[in-house]
Amino acid sequence: METTTAQEADRGSGSDVLIRAEGIEKTYGSRVPFTRTVPVLHGADIELRAGEIVGIVGGNGSGKSTLMNILVGILDADSGTIERTGTVGWCPQESLLYDRLTVDETFRLFGSGYGMSREEIDESKTRLAERLGFEQYLDYRVDQLSGGNRQKVNLGIALMHDPDVLLLDEPYTGFDWETYLQFWDIAEELADDGVGIAMISHLIEERSRLDRIYELRDGVVHDVTDDETGTSDRGVSDDA
């Protein structure tokens, strides 16, 4: 699979496509003799533009998480091409946090990995902890957090380096209603600032918040935006 990194991408080209994936195929092999392989993606195409909030929907086992992991770059496709422009923030449904670290230490660890200074890390941590409501847990170890607070930290880590692209796998799992609404406020603010956001979504009521909806069926991605009613009118056009 051919991949263009952020450093290789030409940001002066005038294109506002932040991620473009074409012809993505993925089959999971079986380690058990005489058992079948599992084809998941069959030539899937998808793109994410600056300022869009895109939903990826589909039935259980349709390949949504596989596609998202390939877009992030943590899973290789069997074939196809991916072009990425800009920095990526990734919030998986199952957090990849270290249980024995405190929340404060977690931000330092990931911030260092992002190449942020200590001052940048502290500013981002303070801002996101206040916005998402976990400031009282900064000295707690991750394994002492509730599921909802763990997911708040998980989302905060994805946001802390101000990414150009935000890829989310049901990021609000465990959120209370207030934090869920705060999440959408943040998402819309980021999109207004030109961040491209793609998220796996199962909630029908979210469709009105999305600019574009992709559905995975039989391993192929279908743009079903025009098939949905009440989709977002935030102003992103198909010709953007």
Image (spheres, rainbow, N blue to C red):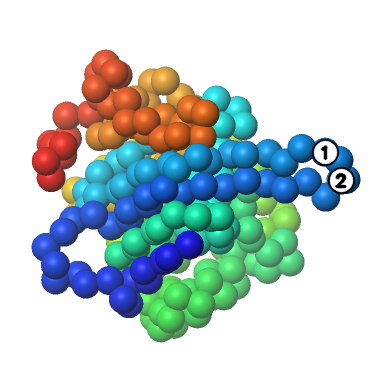
* Residue at 37 percent of width and 30 percent of height: 222
Q: Amino acid at mark 1?
A: Thr
Q: Amino acid at mark 2?
A: Val
Q: Is residue 2 above or below residue 215?
A: below
Measured from the top left, where is residue 160 in percent x and y? 41, 64
Measured from the top left, where is residue 98 in percent x and y? 68, 64
Secondary structure of residue under mark 2: loop
* Res 188 seen here: yes
Q: Is residue 67 above or below residue 97?
A: above
Asked which quadrant contains residue 207, the reply is top left
Q: Quadrant of the C terminus?
A: top left
Residue 146 tag number: none
* Residue at 28 percent of width and 57 percent of height: 18
Measured from the top left, where is residue 161 in percent x and y? 38, 68
* Residue at 33 percent of width and 71 percent of height: 6
Q: Which residue in the protein does label 2 denote?
A: 32
Report, in whole angstroms, how far the alpha carbon at label 2 lies from the one at label 1. Answer: 6 Å
Q: Is residue 143 left or right of residue 222?
A: right
In contact (CB < 8 Å): disc 2 and disc 1: yes
Q: Which residue in the protein does label 1 denote?
A: 35
Q: Is residue 91 above or below residue 11?
A: above
Secondary structure of residue under mark 1: loop
Q: Nearer the viewer, residue 224 or 52?
A: 224
* Residue at 57 percent of width and 47 percent of height: 26
Mark 2 crowd level (few <14, some 14–19, many ≥20, 10 Å Cα): few
